[in-house]
Image (cartoon, rainbow, N blue to C red):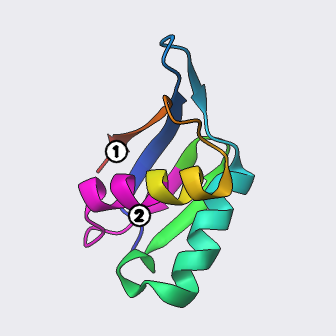
Amino acid sequence: MFLHTLRIERVTAAGEVSPCPIAWIDNFAMRNFTNDAIFDDTLPVADGLMEAGLLVPLPLLQERMEAWFRRKGYLRADDTLRIVKLSL
């Protein structure tokens, strides 16, 4: 079911890269487990790491996760989110 291992990183305007805390990733996942079925096949596993199924559209995941993190105040206006596929 969870075939992708994804690295989830915050990138600042200055170019500093850091893994997103698991609490951020879990907050997104819990919201989407109840409200957005397309992301049901996601599982937060550690700071900066998430597992996802093959049907999870990674560009849409990045878009929605970044928007959620901004609404929650986790990302500043000039920060971006980077999702990198580590395995398949």
Mark 2 or mark 1: which is in front? 2
Kind of residue at disc 1: Ser
Compared with 53, 50 (above or below) is above
Q: Residues within 10 Å of mark 2 (few under 14, many from 20)?
A: many
Judging depth in this view, the residue of 35 and 5 nearest the camera is 35
Q: Circle 2 is placed at which residue position?
A: 52
Residue closer to the observer: 29 or 49 = 29
Residue that badge 1 annotates = 87
Q: Is 11 left, or right, of 19 in this rendering?
A: left
Residue 62 in magenta stretch: yes
Name the residue at 27% across, 67% down: 54
State which region is magenta.
Answer: 50-65
Q: Type of residue at label 2?
A: Ala
Foreground pick, 78 / 55:
78
**Is 13 rendered above or below residue 63?**
above
Q: In x, y percent, where is residue 64?
A: 40, 61
Q: CA distance from mark 2 to mark 1?
A: 10 Å
Label located before the other in sequence (2 or 1): 2
* Quadrant hosting residue 84: top left
Packing grade of label 1 (10 A; few <14, some 14-19, many >=20) is few
Q: Quadrant of the N terminus?
A: bottom left
Q: Quadrant of residue 18?
A: top right
User: 23 and 5: which one is in front?
Assistant: 23
